Image: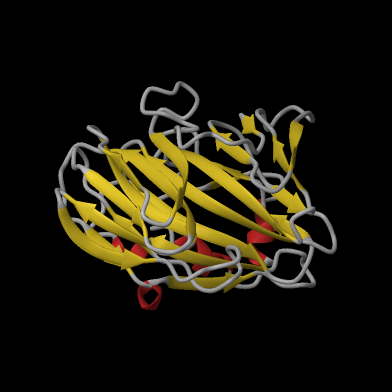
């Protein structure tokens, strides 16, 4: 599913009862200084991540602290984030002039402890190369470093390095629980482009045995839900692409990607891709 950018009026793009990616909750919230947004997800652990601006997070009425260092856009500094347990009241207050933040949620059944992720705690991995048109940097907010503190939710930001090229390549999927070959993980992306008039394309191929597929043209603010199939994406030459990524596992947090047979050999040709794969475990 593709959702073009629009003013969602702080209402979820994928709510707790959505049928497309039922494991995922996703909202984008915009506030002005002093304004607040409160939520409580009965069956979802969650993460609040500022795209821009500075926010204070209170959990169960107690301040957890403040996060957010970026002013202009998602390229303006390092990300920061948080972990909010399921069935826990959370209130976010805007401390800067304005803020835009993501709320990423994932189905889980145990109540854990809340915490903040400051920029010093972001886990970074860079892989690919300009030669292979796969040069990328991933900044894990809730990644392998927090494996024992989080249930089944993975949250990161992915950036192109340079301008133009492929992400999610070789084509892979994670729509079937078939361990140790593959895990079932629902996924949602929100895209941004630099400059903002840039664009990309999200590709889907449902059946490996059929030479057919489809794609969505991506613009600044586009949201994509990945329910099934192979799903690489590409950004046009001359533009940088960012996407905020939510992954939620059906039975476990560690992600096992299944690479399309006809292209899987390219795992051996892309520098650093095995390190990238391991960061999702």
Q: Farthest right residue? A: 237
* Applied colour scheme: secondary structure
Residue at the (28%, 57%) spot, across then down: 57
Q: Quadrant of the C terminus?
A: bottom left
Q: In the picture, residue 162 is in which quadrant?
A: bottom right
Q: Is residue 163 left or right of residue 153?
A: right
Residue at the (42%, 54%) spot, across then down: 155
Does residue 113 appear in this view?
no
Q: Is residue 238 left or right of residue 107?
A: right
Residue 64 location, x and y as percent? 21, 61
Residue 114 location, x and y as percent? 20, 56
Residue at the (45%, 58%) spot, across then down: 50
Q: Nearer the viewer, residue 259 or 60?
A: 60
Residue 270 location, x and y as percent? 67, 67
Q: In the picture, residue 17 is in which quadrant?
A: top left
Examine the rendered structure and indicate whether residue 146 appears above or below residue 60.
below
Q: Quadrant of the N terminus?
A: top right
Does residue 126 appear in this view?
yes
Examine the rendered structure and indicate whether residue 182 appears above or below residue 14.
below
Tally of numbered tags: 0
Q: Is residue 117 left or right of residue 137?
A: left
Residue at the (16%, 50%) spot, across then down: 112
Examine the rendered structure and indicate whether residue 216 appears above or below residue 243.
above
Q: Farthest bottom residue? A: 120
Residue 196 location, x and y as percent? 74, 56
């Amino acid at each position: 599913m593709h959702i073009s950018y629009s003013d969602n009026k702080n209402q979820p793009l994928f709510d707790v009862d959505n049928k497309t990616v039922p494991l995922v909750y996703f909202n984008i919230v915009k506030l002005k200084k002093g304004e607040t947004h409160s939520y409580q997800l009965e069956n979802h652990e969650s993460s609040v991540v500022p795209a821009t601006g500075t926010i204070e997070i209170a959990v169960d009425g107690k301040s957890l602290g403040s996060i957010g260092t970026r002013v202009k856009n998602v390229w303006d500094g390092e990300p920061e984030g948080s972990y909010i347990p399921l069935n826990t009241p959370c209130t976010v207050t805007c401390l800067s002039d304005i803020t835009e933040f993501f709320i990423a949620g994932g189905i889980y059944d145990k109540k854990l402890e809340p915490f903040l992720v400051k920029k010093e705690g972001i886990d970074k991995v860079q892989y690919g190369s300009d030669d292979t048109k796969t040069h990328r940097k991933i900044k894990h907010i809730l990644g392998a470093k927090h494996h024992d503190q989080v249930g089944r939710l993975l949250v990161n930001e992915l950036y192109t390095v340079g301008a133009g090229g492929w992400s999610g390549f070789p084509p892979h999927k994670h729509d079937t629980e078939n361990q140790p070959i593959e895990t079932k993980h629902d996924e949602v992306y929100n895209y941004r482009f630099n400059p903002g008039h840039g664009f990309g394309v999200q590709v889907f191929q449902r059946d490996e045995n059929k030479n057919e597929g489809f794609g969505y043209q991506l613009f600044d603010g586009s949201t994509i839900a990945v329910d099934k199939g192979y799903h690489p994406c590409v950004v046009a030459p001359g533009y940088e692409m960012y996407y905020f990524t939510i992954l939620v596992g059906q039975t476990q947090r560690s992600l096992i990607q299944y690479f399309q047979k006809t292209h899987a050999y390219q795992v051996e040709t892309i520098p650093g891709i095995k390190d990238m794969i391991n960061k999702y475990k």
